[in-house]
Image (cartoon, rainbow, N blue to C red):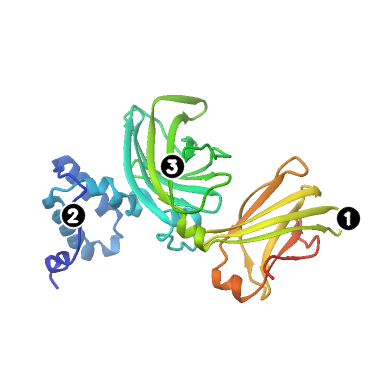
Amino acid sequence: MSIYNELNDIQLDLASYEEEPLTELEQKRWEKRVLKKLHPRRRSTSIKWIGTAIAAVLLLGVTLPFDKVSLAQMPFVSGLLERFINAEKPVDYSTYKTAIGETAENAYGKLTLNEVLVDADRLLISSTFEPAKGVKFNYQTQLPPHVLVNGEDLQETRGSQSVKVSDGIYTIYGDIKLRELPLEGLLHVKITYNTFSTRQRQAIEEPWVFEIEVSAGQIGREMRTFNLDKTITLYNGEQVTLKKVLISPVSTLVYYELSKASESIGFKLISASGKEIPQREGYRSNDIGDTSYIRFEAVEPFDIDAETYSLVPVTMEKNEEAGPPIQINE
């Protein structure tokens, strides 16, 4: 089948975009970037298709889709949140995330907000940064965002960050923990990047600011909450209280309190059939009675209904069982 016939079947909604032709330099830049990503052994069979597709877009004179949704969908430019959440086994979270593709620019360079995903207690953000000439940037440089949700400051942490680079463009993944995050309908989110940190934090006079709406309804409808409020005595006589477990399509979150327990205690999440859910991160409060948490990978909804899962206390040093298991779904 001719490539032109295949392109005829593609449906594009261009009503919301203005037409603005690419410069010759921009055309060459995009073509070079795409061709460079092709596998060497497949380049001879793939170049013609990619080149024709790019030419078709350029002939349309449409550039904003690359700055909008299409930019967020191009992995070698923006990166996908799925790869940040689980690089080994990425799962399609398109049902839950929102593609943005908005770009802001200041003296430091261009920052594009690509994708935002609402999880049980956090926002996951993918963005790309193209530094201005003379601006130094690497994986140690921090761009911590400040987030308002529906006009409220619900942010608990500045957020962790992971950086990947390709052709001088940096993909930045952010994990921002929030408190009392509403999980229904559309959320109005304002994300402000007002500091640029290398060894010292620098205030940005003209910060990158994005005001967007993201959907939390689907995550909220599919999330399962198990209120436990169970205190167990460990084998060494110390105590720990399991507060609640939130199981979302993206992660499994366990809240607990150390009423009388050492810092050497952790948890495993194991099914009745012996399947262990990998742990991803955690936070342990230094104050007895304050809430700590552990985040595991997601438990499939049908799994949580098909069999029981238990939290098993373990020692951090030897990973040995330290107390009786607590079943979370009875």
Place of residue 89 in the rendered image (x, y in percent of width and height, measured from the top left): 49, 63
- Identified by mark 2, the residue type is Ile
Residue 328, placed above or below residue 138: below
Residue 151, placed above or below residue 231: above
One can see residue 316 in this view: no
Place of residue 200 in the rendered image (x, y in percent of width and height, measured from the top left): 52, 25
Which badge, 1 or 3, is on the more N-terminal residue? 3
Please tell me the numbered disc located at residue 189: 3
Place of residue 23 in the rendered image (x, y in percent of width and height, measured from the top left): 15, 40
- Identified by mark 1, the residue type is Gly
Look at the numbered discs 1 and 3 and tell me whether their residues touch, using CB distance below 8 Å.
no
Helix, strand or loop status at disc 1: loop
Left or right? Give the position of 113 relative to 284. Answer: left
Helix, strand or loop status at disc 3: strand
Q: Nearer the viewer, residue 194 or 245?
A: 245
| 3D distance between C-alphas at marks 2 and 3 | 34 Å
Residue 185, placed above or below residue 275: above
Circle count = 3
Helix, strand or loop status at disc 2: helix
Left or right? Give the position of 33 relative to 213. Answer: left
Please name the residue that numbered disc 1 is placed on. Answer: 237
Residue 197, placed above or below residue 296: above
> Quadrant where the C terminus lies?
bottom right
Place of residue 208 in the rendered image (x, y in percent of width and height, measured from the top left): 38, 33
